[in-house]
Image (cartoon, grey):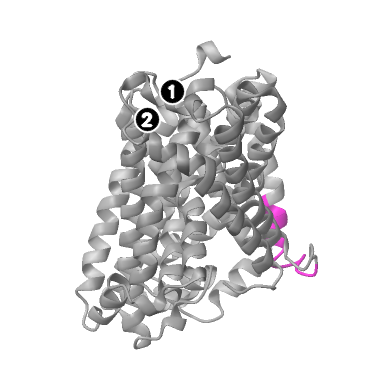
Amino acid sequence: MENNRSTFQGKIGFVLAAAGSAVGLGNLWRFPYLAAKYGGGMFLLIYLILAITFGFVLMVTEIAIGRKTQLSPLRAFGALSKKWTWLGHLATIVPVLIFPYYCLIGGWVTKYAGVMISGKVGDAAQDSFFGEYISATVDPIIWFLIFIVATTLVVIFGVNKGIEKLSKVLMPALVVLTLVLSVYVVTRPGALAGVKYYLLPNIHDLSVKTFLSALGQLFYSMSLAMGIMITYGSYFSKEEHIEKASRQIEVFDTLIAFLAGLMIIPAVFVFSGGDKEALGTGPSLMFVTLPKVFNSMQGGAIIGALFFFLVLFAAITSSVSIMEAIVSGIIDRFNISRLKATLIVAVYGILLGIACSFGFGIWSNVKLFGFDILDFLDFISNSVLLPLVGMLTCIVVGFVTKPKTVIEEIELNGPFKMKGFYTVMVKWVAPIFIFAILVSSILQGFGVLTI
């Protein structure tokens, strides 16, 4: 299987596909929410510093592991060290858990895009609209199926005809849409206060919580420790430069997150009269607060439709990458066709996704350790497994295979200018701070700590 492995046809295709994976719902609603909650400009400054240090180290590591082994994460760690084969299985569990509920949320986005296109922004702005929609039995399932079928079709077409072609169209469109909406929002009357809060750091907003939340956001924003970058790295040509590609992915991803904040924070500030609390948390920002903002704008129906199209683009490129990480592992492990592997994952995703949807309605009394079904999957995957896999990956590279394993792969295409910095980061700095994220995430999940 390894000898016949597909590759991206060029660096641009790889960068856009990997950036498409990284740019998702974490950029477009979680990043603005956290930026608003933790001091705006200070959060942004810390995030940018972490992106060019931690983010870079973790990204080049995963891409290099994928390209060196030419395998999915399921088998890549075993190829590096047989004693660490189990880490590949652990890394593969992450996208397996995320895929069903991510596609369900993608269905919510698809629904809202349809509502906005039909001009019913006033309906979406009603307080009860979102709650009534997600608690229904049939309607959210229909939109969920539309989204997951679209994702499945892209993955069936494979690396070149599916993922690469989709990314080359959607990612430039995503950038253009984000720029247009950001410019529109920041030029609205009253938006300047929100822009200042978002861009100007205030030393009084510096805290441990700000640092931990920014570092945790890296995993969401850059698709790190999900096995995705290892999978995409396994399709990356040996002729291309990993260091340069990683930087370009980082720039692309961080630009979209930055513009999302520039688009959402000033808009909500204008709508709420400067109340940070109006940014809400999680789904309430995107599906409750923002429709109210669009409804209050002149031409809000058009802006709302463009916004949810933008989010839909981001969601579909990410769901494709999550599904591909699972499909690639199944193909490597069982040597079956891409079509069969993709259909197996699709059926699994549909069944568990329906269970997640029912968790807001007819199964709302079903709780797992106090969480509903979707929140439980999200907690295990994002709060526990993501930092755990990231930390263990650093330990494997830092102390088992040694940093030279990654450095040699990167230097196939020229000198690795930051190898000294990389070695210190991957061995000592990154594992310690990622462990801090792991502990804080678990304590936060069980209500012991509030971040």
Whether residue 136 appears in this view of the structure is no
Q: Quadrant of the C terminus?
A: bottom right
Q: Nearer the viewer, residue 40 or 45?
A: 45
The reply to whether the C-beta atoms of the residues labelled 2 and 1 are less than 8 Å apart is: yes
Which comes sooner in the sequence, label 2 or label 1? Answer: 2
Query: Horizontal and vertical percent for residue 226?
Result: 57, 42
Observer-nearest of 78 and 265: 78
Quarter of the figure that contains the N terminus:
top right
Instruction: Name the residue located 47 percent from the left edge and 28 percent from the top edge.
Output: 406
Q: What numbered label is drawn on residue 242?
A: 2
Instruction: Tell which of 408 and 152 is nearer to you.
Output: 408
Quadrant of res 225: top right
Q: Is residue 364 magenta?
A: yes
Q: Which mark is residue 409?
A: 1
- Measured along the vertical axis of the image, is residue 419 above or below residue 173? above
Answer few, some or many: residues within 10 Å of disc 2's Cα (few below 14, many 20 plus, some between 14 and 19). Answer: many
Q: Position of residue 35 (x, y in %)?
A: 41, 69
Amino acid type at circle 2 is: Ile
Q: Amino acid at mark 1?
A: Glu
Residue 82 occupies which quadrant of the picture?
top right
- The magenta stretch is 353-365
Rendered residue at 25%/52% (across/down):
176
Give the residue drawn at x 61%, y 74%: 450
